[in-house]
Structures are given as structure tokens and as C-alpha cells.
Amino acid sequence: MNILSRYKLTAVAVILLAGNTSFAQPGSSVDPSISGGSGSGVNDQWMPSKTPDGAYDRNPHYSAPIPWQYIREDDILWKKRVWREIDTREKANVGFRYTGDENSGGGMFIEILIDAIKRGKIKAYSNFDDRFTQALSKEQLMEQLTPKPDTNTLVDPITGQEVIKIIKKDFEPDRITKYRLKEDWIFDRNQGQMVVRIVGIAPVMDVIGDAGDYRGSKPLFWLYYPDIRGLLANYEVFNPLNDVARYTWDEFFESRQFSSKITKVSNPFGAQAGSGGSFYKDNMSAMESLYESQNAANEIFNKEHDMWVY
């Protein structure tokens, strides 16, 4: 055997040994906090696995958001403020309603946000307006999230007397059926393209009456989106097609993977949310509102092409 053959055999042996070491299967002495989701989840019901849960050891994914390219005001040729709404009951938005696993935080998207607010990682602002004028405390947040308790009158089977029993209710994440986005669509001549920047995001909760009837919906709070990108980059979005090919929530929003409709654009009748000018509050039918929403989307789409003419 010549020297070259010996080197080849040695190299093959080193590769095989490295492979056996790097790809240890479940059941080996691998720290569970390295192979799967680590500590506690974002709600009290989530129980993390005590052992590696899967056919292979999964390394923890740490991600950071890609910084936005700086935009000079002098380079802005056109800008439009847009409000849109995401309905989580649509098939394309199933990730918002996914109950969670070890890699997605152990809870729904709304629970990720609420947990981060409670821990002081991000700041929530009042739903009084969408301009982030009033910061919410933890107590104010819990007051909005916790439903009012029910009061029932029961008859004590022993004494026969009526007893008032107060039944406390917990926050129901399933009642968050929509999310509102506030965006700026900007044509930047330096980049030579239309650029979209999400400014704020607000979860919208269904309001249910005492008889179980639907009373409407209301935003719970507003979050300043640039401040929460770092948090969103640490949680994954459920992919129904492939469990190993998942976006982070930051990538999900930045690549526009959600389905939504425009509810309002900046206009002389109500440049701020809640002050009029919405497609869905101006005596329009549902069909007319959808047409106006699509017209606004087409205007933005065509504007980028029109700018090249100038």
C-alpha cells in the first residue's frame, strides 16, 4: 500500500468518526436545551420536552433581523400611508392561529407578543390612537385582556339558601381574529424601487356579549414595529408544507407572506385611524369596500411603474 492510499484511508476514517459524533441520535447524552426548544413557553400550559424530541438533534436557531436600508428624505419621490387588515381565519394566515411547538415559542402569535410585553422586552401603546402616544403598563394590559367575571346565583343543596358565585375567566387567544398594520409605501429614487415599511401592528379582538353574541371588534394595543423586529426574529412561523423550512416572524412580515386587505389610505377625510375615511366605515357595502381596497392596491402597484416615466 502506497503513501497516497494510506492518506485516503485516514481521511475517510476521520470523516466517519466526525459524522458519528456530530449526528447523535435521540437517546444519547445530549442536552435537551440544545437539541430542541429550550426553556418555558409563552403560556402557562406549554410544557417543554425533557428529552430530545425528534429523529435528529436540532441546533437552536438564533436569528437577527436584516437592518433596513436607510432612506433619505430628499430621495423620496412619492409616499402613501396605508392601513391594512390581516384576517387570521384565512388559509394563508394559518400561522397566526397555530397553537405552537418548541420551535415557535409554545404558543400562538398573540401569546408571543403578550409574553414579551409582560417580560418588558417590548412596549405596548394604547389603542386610543395608532400614533403610539400613550404607553400601556402591565396592569393596564391585563385589564384589557382579562374578561369580566360572571356572577351566578346558585342554591346550596344543604342549606337551601341562594349563594352568589363569581366565575373568573381567562384570556382566550382564539378571540384574536385579526391584526391591523400601519405602513408607509415609499418610492426611493436612490434604490429605484417602491419600498414598504411596516410602522405599527395591532391585534384585534372580537367582542362577545353576555349572551354569546358578536358585538364587533376592537384593537387591544399598538406595537411600534421597528422595535419588535428583534423579538420576531427569534420565533418561527408554522409552515404547513415543510416542518424544516420555516420563516421567522420577521422574515414572514418582511417578505409579505400574509394575506390582507387595505382598509384605508391617507386621505383628506381622515389621515389618522379612527377619524373617518375608512373604506369599511363610509356607508359602503362589503362588496364596494373590497373594490375600493383593490383599487388602492392597484394604485400603489401602478405608481412604481409610472415613476419610471418621469
Image: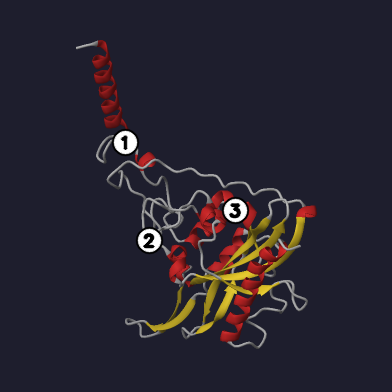
- Going from N to C along the chain, the mark reached first, 3 or 2, is 3
> Mark 3 and mark 2: span between their CA atoms?
25 Å
Q: Could you say which quadrant of the image residue 36 lies in?
A: top left
Quadrant for the C terminus, please. bottom right
Residue 290 versus residue 91 in the image, above or below: below
Q: Which mark is residue 30?
A: 1
Q: Are marks 1 and 2 in contact (CB under 8 Å)?
A: no
* Rendering coords of residue 109 (x, y %): 49, 60
Residue bearing the label numbered 3: 228
> Mark 1 and mark 3: span between their CA atoms?
32 Å
Describe the element under mark 1 as helix, strand or loop: loop
> Residue at point 46% right, 83% down?
212
- Going from N to C along the chain, the mark reached first, 1 or 2, is 1
* Rendering coords of residue 165 (x, y %): 44, 77
Describe the element under mark 3 as helix, strand or loop: helix
Of residue 87 and residue 242, the one placed in the foreground of this image is: 242
Asked whether, in this view, residue 125 is left or right of residue 9, the answer is: right
Quadrant for the N terminus, please. top left
